[in-house]
Image (cartoon, helix red, strand yellow):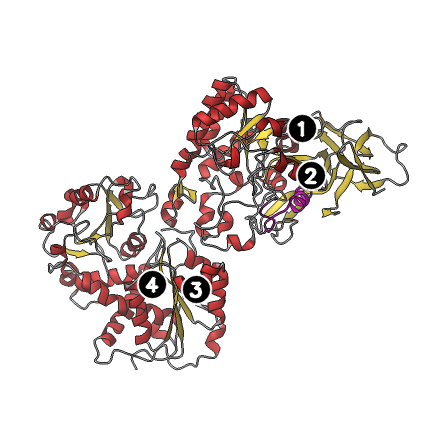
């Protein structure tokens, strides 16, 4: 959808054709592959990663959920912005692949001593990182880092309001594994990952949401029909080129949705004159118990977490069977294992 | 020949320079003629063979246009305060390489040029440089937008342009008083049009690309609201108003309408606003971050047509150097601004589709008049005038290389762009400061 943005899913051999036993020495010479965003990706590329996630899901259900696929590889988590669940998820995923994991925290780094972002990144690369997992509050930072590194793969763990590609993948994976509509159509364990005709509503603060941008790209690439729902103050000022419908009326839409995806509402939006009060937001766009009663049979409720209970979603709704919020967290580990495996390109067979 | 002398507070070069074989082009038109310069002034235009001394420096102008030196209304020289990014000397050298013989130095230095002593300091630094440096003064003390700067003491030193450039004067009442005060001094108030509340938090043009890229936008209306206000205040006060770096279709339409209504207002545009768009930000390279931001393709087309139809009086660079490390930061953290002095003429000649004379009007004699320096810069080229000239090969094609610059900074967004039209020689105060495309000092 944004044709002029840099390469998103870099061309890569499919995982099934990855060499099964080549050593690491000559691999370090090739250009690194980056996972920066899903905007502009084709459905086929996403389906490769989703199918690979299935295989790691199987690994994660074993008594000892660990494989040697990334043994000897060093993954550096560079989290310039606070994050608990994404960092833990990447950390867990890398360890289950037997990678060495180093965590970099901006609070204790030289960035506070006047070092530039580029210097910091080049230092980490010089230490021998095979991949950096980057979270930053500024949009575009993973793209900048990818333009500076020579050997290290860059994995985007969320940049500003722009992209959060692994979140989008885990959300799509969760839809595929949890939606009764899809299960009825393709069977419960289908690897079709075909969302044609699926109606998704993404509700809330679209404008400031990397989750929304990546999910619009990934879900529509897989065939879903996406409607963005929110007040005009929380929608992007210009939606030219976005493959979506837009609505300001959740009540008019809710009975049609197969997936109701609530975004986290940052409380400071009320002080930026984007909303009068949180109470009024809840009244118009919150998934209250009463409003959730109007969801149709087979609809699922999603949230990227952490939820503001009583604002965008009621606690009662998160505990209903239609809520797949905890499945999203579980699936996140499998999806991130797939991403690290796919882009780090270890030669060791993944199931051993 | 290369000795220099201080004379009446001004330094000029003692010696003869002969520009031979070119076509002289100034506001009066064009003619094949040689130009002889001696002791800082033009002594003959035409056949100079019998007038040349044996010691004259001869500059080959064959196939070239010999024009009045260019005048930039909008240069950030960064000194005092930001000498890691640029100095008066380095900016002046870049200016000379770009064909300029005079620049107006923006006052948003540290400390800002909001009083006579900083103005004197910048002017003194400029006297030793390879172009004439005309400091602008601030409108408000410390550019803080709260109280008027002592404009009269700066005007007494020769300051003719006052601006808080970098930000607009937000308080309408204060701007009214500034214009009233300026009118009595006979000076020009120049505004950076940006309603700060509307643009707050923004880092690029608000539109299709800001929405896609997840970067907070600055709407065109942030500029247009202040253009609208300042045109009203100029009408109210009778002050001379100059609008800096206009970038939107709406702003230019308002200027055009105000001009038709008889208002004494002038406007400049920067080369990046007719050569780059907000789509260039898709790389997230902060070299494309600038204020006002790169706008939509529609705005770029409007800027070009406003340049062609005379709505725009001047092309000004907004040359804004930033140290390399400052631009190796996240897009929303990096400072706005891009280099411009060495590429402005090539971009204007390559991208506007205008006759050379029209481009020179926008870059030499019209800005000289706005800056109040028409007696010294901007031609015409005739005997008795100060020798401030440039020689332009309008056919030469070259590729922009950011590392080939006299600037101390590298924030040039035109890497790899092919341009047609290049400065061959520049003569300032009679001294050949650029010869064959190379700075002489």
- Could you tell me which residue is drawn at 15 percent across and 63 percent down? A183
Mark nearest the camera among 1 and 3 is 3
Q: Give the mark count.
A: 4
- The segment highlighted magenta reads B81-98
Residue A346 screen position, x and y as percent: 39, 76
| Secondary structure type for disc 4 | helix
Q: Numbered disc 2: what chain?
A: B
Q: Marks 4 and 3, Cα distance to the nearest angstrom?
A: 36 Å
Q: Numbered disc 4: what chain?
A: A
Residue neighbourhood size for the residue with mark 2, other residues' Cα within 10 Å, grouped as few (<14), some (14–19), many (≥20): some
| Secondary structure type for disc 2 | helix
**Front one among B35 and B188:** B188
- Could you tell me which residue is drawn at 27 percent across and 49 percent down? A266
The quadrant of the rendering that contains the N terminus of chain B is top right
Residue receiving disc 1: B373
Q: Marks 4 and 1, Cα distance to the nearest angstrom?
A: 63 Å
Q: Marks 2 and 4, Cα distance to the nearest angstrom?
A: 63 Å
Residue receiving disc 2: B124
Residue neighbourhood size for the residue with mark 4, other residues' Cα within 10 Å, grouped as few (<14), some (14–19), many (≥20): some
Q: Is residue A45 magenta?
A: no
């Amino acid at each position: 959808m944004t044709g002029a943005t840099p390469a998103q899913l870099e061309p890569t051999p499919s995982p099934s054709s990855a060499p099964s036993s080549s050593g690491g020495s000559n691999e370090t010479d090739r250009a690194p592959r980056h996972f920066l965003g899903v905007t502009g990706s084709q459905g086929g590329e996403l389906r490769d990663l989703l199918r690979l996630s299935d295989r790691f899901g199987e690994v994660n259900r074993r008594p000892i959920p660990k494989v040697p696929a990334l043994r000897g590889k060093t993954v550096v988590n560079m989290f310039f912005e606070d994050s608990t669940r994404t960092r833990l998820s990447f950390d867990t995923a890398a360890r289950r692949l037997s990678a060495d994991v180093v965590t970099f925290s901006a609070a204790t780094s030289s960035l506070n001593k006047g070092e530039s972002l580029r210097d910091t990144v080049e230092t980490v690369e010089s230490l021998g990182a095979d991949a950096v997992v980057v979270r930053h509050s500024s949009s575009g930072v993973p793209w900048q880092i990818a333009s500076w590194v020579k050997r290290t793969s860059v994995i985007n763990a969320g940049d500003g309001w722009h992209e959060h590609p692994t979140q989008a993948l885990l959300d799509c994976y969760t839809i595929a594994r949890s939606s009764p509509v899809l299960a009825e159509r393709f069977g419960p364990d289908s690897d079709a990952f075909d969302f044609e005709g699926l109606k998704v509503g993404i509700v809330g603060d679209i404008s400031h949401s990397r989750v929304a941008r990546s999910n619009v790209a990934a879900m529509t690439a897989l065939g879903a029909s996406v409607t963005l729902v929110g007040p005009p103050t929380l929608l992007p000022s210009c939606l030219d080129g976005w493959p979506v419908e837009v609505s300001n009326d959740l009540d008019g839409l809710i009975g049609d949705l197969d997936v109701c995806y609530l975004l986290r509402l940052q409380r400071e939006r009320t002080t930026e004159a984007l909303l009068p009060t949180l109470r009024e937001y809840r009244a118009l766009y919150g998934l209250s118990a009463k409003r959730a009663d109007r969801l149709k049979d087979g609809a699922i409720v999603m949230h990227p977490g952490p939820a503001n209970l009583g604002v965008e979603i009621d606690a009662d709704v998160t505990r209903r069977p239609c809520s797949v919020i905890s499945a999203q967290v579980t699936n996140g580990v499998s999806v991130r294992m797939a991403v690290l495996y796919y882009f780090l390109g270890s030669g060791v067979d993944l199931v051993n | 020949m290369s000795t220099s002398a201080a004379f009446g507070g001004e330094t000029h070069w003692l010696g003869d320079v002969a520009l031979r074989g070119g076509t002289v082009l100034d506001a009066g038109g064009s003619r094949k003629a040689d130009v002889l310069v001696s002791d800082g002034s033009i002594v003959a235009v035409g056949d100079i063979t019998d007038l040349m001394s044996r010691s004259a420096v001869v500059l080959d102008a064959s196939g070239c246009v010999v024009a009045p030196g260019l005048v930039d209304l909008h240069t950030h020289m960064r000194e005092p305060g930001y000498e890691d990014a640029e100095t008066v000397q380095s900016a002046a050298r870049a200016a000379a390489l770009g064909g300029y013989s005079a620049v107006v130095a923006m006052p948003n230095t540290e400390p800002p040029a909001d009083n006579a002593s900083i103005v004197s300091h910048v002017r003194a630094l400029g006297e030793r440089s390879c172009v004439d440096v005309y400091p602008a003064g601030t409108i408000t003390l410390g550019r803080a937008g709260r109280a008027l700067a002592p404009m009269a003491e700066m005007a007494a030193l020769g300051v003719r342009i006052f601006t808080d450039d970098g930000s607009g004067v937000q308080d309408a009442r204060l701007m009214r008083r500034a214009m009233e005060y300026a009118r009595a001094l006979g000076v020009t108030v120049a505004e950076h049009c940006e309603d700060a509340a509307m643009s707050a938090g923004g880092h690029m043009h608000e539109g299709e690309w800001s929405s896609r890229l997840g970067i907070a936008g600055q709407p065109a209306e942030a500029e247009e609201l202040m253009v609208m206000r300042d045109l009203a205040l100029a009408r109210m006060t009778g002050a001379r108003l100059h609008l800096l770096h206009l970038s939107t279709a709406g702003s230019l339409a308002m200027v055009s309408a105000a001009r038709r209504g008889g208002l004494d207002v002038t406007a400049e545009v920067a080369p990046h606003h007719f050569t780059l768009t907000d789509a260039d930000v898709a790389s997230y390279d902060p070299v494309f971050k600038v204020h006002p931001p790169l706008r939509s393709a529609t705005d770029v087309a409007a800027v070009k047509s406003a340049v062609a139809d005379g709505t725009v009086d001047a092309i000004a660079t907004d040359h804004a150097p930033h140290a390399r490390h400052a631009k190796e930061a996240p897009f929303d953290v990096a400072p706005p601004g891009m280099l411009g002095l060495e590429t402005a003429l090539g971009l204007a000649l390559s991208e506007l589709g205008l006759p050379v004379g029209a481009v020179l009007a926008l870059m030499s004699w019209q800005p000289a008049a706005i800056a109040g320096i028409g007696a010294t810069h901007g031609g015409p080229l005739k005997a008795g005038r100060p020798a401030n000239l440039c020689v332009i090969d309008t056919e030469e094609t070259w590729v922009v290389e950011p590392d080939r610059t006299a600037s101390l900074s590298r924030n040039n967004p035109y890497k790899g762009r092919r341009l047609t039209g290049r400065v061959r020689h520049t003569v300032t105060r009679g001294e050949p400061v650029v010869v064959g495309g190379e700075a002489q000092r």
